[in-house]
Amino acid sequence: MSFRLSRLALLLAVSTIVSALSGVVATYWEAQDEFRDVLDDDLENQGELLAQVLSSEYIRVPGVDLDALLGDYFDAINEDALWLTVYDLETGKSLSNLPHELPLRKVDDRDLHLKMDGSDWYGVQRKGDHVVVQVLRRGQRFDDVQHEVLEDITAPILVVSGINLLLLALLMAMVLWPLSRLSRQLENRGPFSLDPLELKSPAREIEVLRNTLNRLIGGIGETLIRERHFADDLAHEMRTPLTTLKLELTASEPDFEVMKFEVNRLAKVLEQLLTLARVEHGQWQGSFTAVRLDEVCLQELATLQPAFAAATIQTDTNLPPVTIRGDRVLLGVLLRNILNNVLCHCPARTSLSLRLEQSEGTAVLRVTDSGPGMTNAQLERLNSGFTRLDSRSQGLGLGLAICRRIVEVHAATMHFKARADHLPGLQIEFIFPIEAGLT
Amino acid sequence: MYILLLEDDPNLGRALRKLLSTAYQVQWVRSLAEASNHVAMVDYDVVLLDLGLPDGDGVEWLRAMRSRQWLTPVLIISARDALNDRVLGLDTGADDYIVKPFEAEELLARIRVLLRRQSGSAQPRLTCGSLSFSAEAQQFYIGDEAISLPAMEYQILAVLMHSASKPVIRERLIQQLYGLGDSADSNTLDVHIHTLRKRIGKDRIETLRGFGYRLVPL
């Protein structure tokens, strides 16, 4: 099931308003009935009580101070909302707190509805031994009390509901609308658009979401750039020897040595591509074991030692035992590619050193040569993902892509630097993580 | 005609130089820095430009050169075949773009087009009076009759022909004959001009004292 959060929020707002209003109305009607009952009971009780009192303490009317007599029983005797009348059945006289000349209509009436001073009066009539007592309340007074009660009950409900609506609106402004904008931006985005998302919201969660998405987009962008560099390099590595072959094949005097060289070059590129494909598709992390990095270095160096000797490149090592988690075969490919690169780029009578050290949970391997080195711009290009600098790579451009991938699957880093001692040459620094417990 | 070849791959550079040298004087360089030095000294007829070079990107170099009103025709030779790359190369100021691997004949044909356009002609055969030149056949004609020329005289006449009756300075012709770096003898040029005049007619090449030569339409 799919729905829009904004519609859910709207539904919630409507529900809040409806529940608040229905609560107010229900409370109003319930309070009205209850309050009317309470007032009616009160009047009835007062009428009964007064009739009994006046019967037990029979007092002739007039000749009595009604205020003084009733003051003890009726707190609100002086209120103009309460109308009290006592009829003496023996003398036919009457006494009331409000001036009126209304005669007693029926002795046996119990509920009364009278009109006086332009107001409706509601109340009860009770008969004692010698007297009849009428107690009435002004209808307007009932409405006033009812409104006061309504205000007291409904005001908090309306205030709380208003605050809820405000909070809901705030929630929409801070979360739902930014999410909608984000959704629209993503919907309208072309498949190759990698611009950062523009999304402003004070909500921390939205900020985290935006930053995470932008990091992801940035990562995709970097990967695409790297892939493009790789595609360019691959195109160069394959098309350049093919062009040479085509030109030589159509030349009047083909150079067979060059053709043989270019065919071998293409074969090497193909071999590197296959290696890269195996690295890309292998589930390497699952097969990682403890590997002695120093032994890998020594073994690969020993394999290439004759080539270094032939090239008169002097090798020097300082490789204390260091164990990392990794794949022995992949690490061998990594070292071989790097050492081949040194062989390819370093002239005769230069040197190569391999240094390994362990510190703070990392193993640092530094491969340093005393070859021609690189300019800062070249170092920057290599560190930013380019895999080929010049035609001398002879397929090693792909080798560098393979190295990068192997380094990535080992959660390691590879960095190209100028030599720390400022002498000509290049230093490649690998930093591998060391898991706790590995010895 | 004088071509600057900018290609960093040694074998491809050699193969291209071998191919082009059959018809043109070729200067091969392997970096942008070298190329900048050469174009500052020589007025090449065409530059063949590879894009991925050790000291930078060929497109950026071309952009910088074009911003300085450098007008020499440029043919990009690149392994990058994406539409964006081709459009970027042409929009930056290249006159043509050819993707590796290409056929030798196609490359030569495209160079001929650039040279022909540069001389202001849309015809495959350049003419100056009754003298004409087919770049494709690498052959000069007077009227309908083909004339055979030694290599040096051929080079000199090709330059004069592509200049379309405009004066050509002596240094340009000397560069055409010897390229850069070689010690060229100025008298040798006079000898070749003399020989050429004997073959195509004395009055067809006018000497501009202290400047150079000009082909006269007869």
Image (spheres, coloured by chain):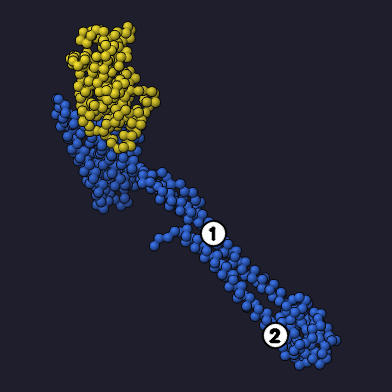
Chain colours: A blue, B yellow
Which of label 2 and label 1 is nearer to you?
Answer: 2
In the visual, does B148 lie left or right of A65? left
Q: Secondary structure at mark 1?
A: helix
Q: Are marks 2 and 1 on the same chain?
A: yes
**Picture coordinates of residue A327, whole percent (x, y):** 24, 48
The quadrant the C terminus of chain B occupies is top left
Q: Secondary structure at mark 2?
A: strand
Q: Is residue A307 visible?
A: no
**Picture coordinates of residue A81, whole percent (x, y):** 74, 76
**Picture coordinates of residue A429, whole percent (x, y):** 31, 39
Q: Exactly how many numbered labels are in the figure?
A: 2
Q: Quadrant of residue B47?
A: top left
Q: Quadrant of residue A308?
A: top left
- Residue nearest the observer in this picture, B72 or B128: B128
Q: Amino acid at mark 1?
A: Leu
Q: Which residue is mark 2?
A: A111
- Residue A119's place in the image compared with A303, above or below, is below
Q: Is residue A122 visible?
A: yes
The quadrant the N terminus of chain B occupies is top left
Q: What residue is rendered at 27% in x and 25% in y? A: B113
- Residue nearest the observer in this picture, A122 or A82: A122
**Picture coordinates of residue B14, whole percent (x, y):** 21, 25
Q: Chain of mark 2?
A: A
Q: Which residue is mark 1?
A: A167
Q: What residue is rendered at 26% in x and 14% in y? A: B129
Q: What residue is rendered at 63% in x and 78% in y? A: A34
Q: Amino acid at mark 2?
A: Asp
Q: Chain of mark 1?
A: A
Extreme right residue here? A63
Q: What residue is rendered at 54% in x and 59% in y? A: A167
Q: Residues within 10 Å of mark 1 (few under 14, many from 20)?
A: few
Q: Quadrant of residue B60?
A: top left
